[in-house]
Image (cartoon, rainbow, N blue to C red):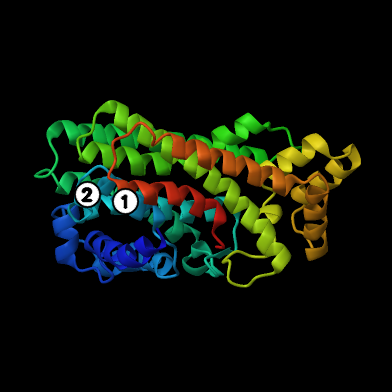
Amino acid sequence: MRERFVEWRPRIDDAIEDLVPRVVEETYLSDFFGEATYQYQAEAIQAALADPLWNLLDRGGKRWRAILLLVIVEALGEDPEEYLPFACIPEILHNGTIIVDDVEDGARKRRGQEALHQVFGTDIALNAGNAMYFIPLKVIDRNADVLSDSQRLQSYEMLTHELNRTHLGQGMDIYWHNQEAVTVNERRYYEMCACKTGCLARIVARLAAIVTDQPDEVEHDLAAYAEEMSIAFQIGDDILDIEHTLDQAGDFGKEFGNDIREGKKTLMVIYTAEHAPPEEVARLEEILWAEDNTDEEILKAIEIMQSVDALEYANDRAEELAASARGQLDDLDLESEAESDLREFTRFVIEREA
């Protein structure tokens, strides 16, 4: 699967550049957005949309959502080359959510550099992030010769449904980290992940099924695979934040103890709140609620979580979800090599180092 990242990432960036070029000209604006009623200003769109988008994309990221769509297409017996434009949809959507999430979280860093709202200002960051929810929809419109009317309608309805649920997940996450006490239970945490992270992965799987004209049951099983895999990914991401904080690694792209500074109610925090002594839970809640934390406080929070083996518990749950995701593929008639990559991918999301 790692070879896929090397092979496809530059191709995906080229396809994204067809949607949002690095250099914006008025001819592009007229072609992509329609003729101006009066007059576009390419310079303004360059500074307010293209520059922030490419600033973020050029920092890195594995493009795994886009690559996953292409691997699913191949597993379904189709040529992924022909579906490259559709792979841009989840990737642009994902990066749009990153920009908006960082504003909402007050994040200071993203992918090893200042968060976009710190570089370009909150107004430009929010506008660019929101635009990235809508620009990918043009892919459906621009491929009317490839998709039937029914497929295009299915795509629009699916995207509307999943993106709505994405905001439910973000809303739950924001609500919880704006509470001092840890009140959320494990099932609600999984639902938050299924919405916030899972819906983008479901978009990947469902879009691959729709554009290749698969039966409903195939779309359903692929969506279940993607959702469970993405929840495992989110848990793995939260574990990585703790592990890299302990290692003080400089290449993770987030600041020291990022999730603790933001007061996030991760699975590890939830488990600790249910199993640690009350006085330790109160101290953990105090640290999570604080406006700012010292490095010592962050390490104390991790120590409390480690005292009840919360990291091990979270890793076990991620492994279980990854195994369940692989099971969703069992009844599908998939191309063997691509299917192997899909199964390997469920291991990659929880074994990765960044």
Number of other residues with Cα within 10 Å of mark 1, as a class: few under 14, some 14 to 19, many 20 or more: few
| Vertical arrangement, residue 31 with respect to residue 176, above or below | below
| Image location (x, y in percent) of residue 313 | 70, 42
- In terms of sequence position, does the residue under pointer 2 or pointer 1 come before the other? 2
In the drawing, does residue 333 fall left or right of residue 196?
left
**Kind of residue at disc 1:** Glu
Q: Which residue is mark 1?
A: 337
| Vertical arrangement, residue 93 with respect to residue 250, above or below | above
- Which residue is depicted at the point 70% across and 63% down? 245
Quarter of image, res 161: top left
| Image location (x, y in percent) of residue 67 | 34, 55
- Which residue is depicted at the point 31% across and 46% down? 336
Number of other residues with Cα within 10 Å of mark 2, as a class: few under 14, some 14 to 19, many 20 or more: some
Q: How many marks?
A: 2
Residue 135 is at least partly visible in this image? no
Tag 1's secondary structure? helix
| Image location (x, y in percent) of residue 106 | 60, 56
Which quadrant holds the C terminus?
Answer: bottom right
Nearer the observer, 347 or 52? 347
In the drawing, does residue 162 fall left or right of residue 183?
left
| Image location (x, y in percent) of residue 303 | 82, 54
| Vertical arrangement, residue 191 with respect to residue 304, above or below | above
Quarter of image, res 28: bottom left
Residue at the left extreme, as displayed: 145
Tag 2's secondary structure? helix
Q: Which residue is mark 2?
A: 139
**Kind of residue at disc 2:** Val
| Vertical arrangement, residue 95 with respect to residue 52, above or below | above
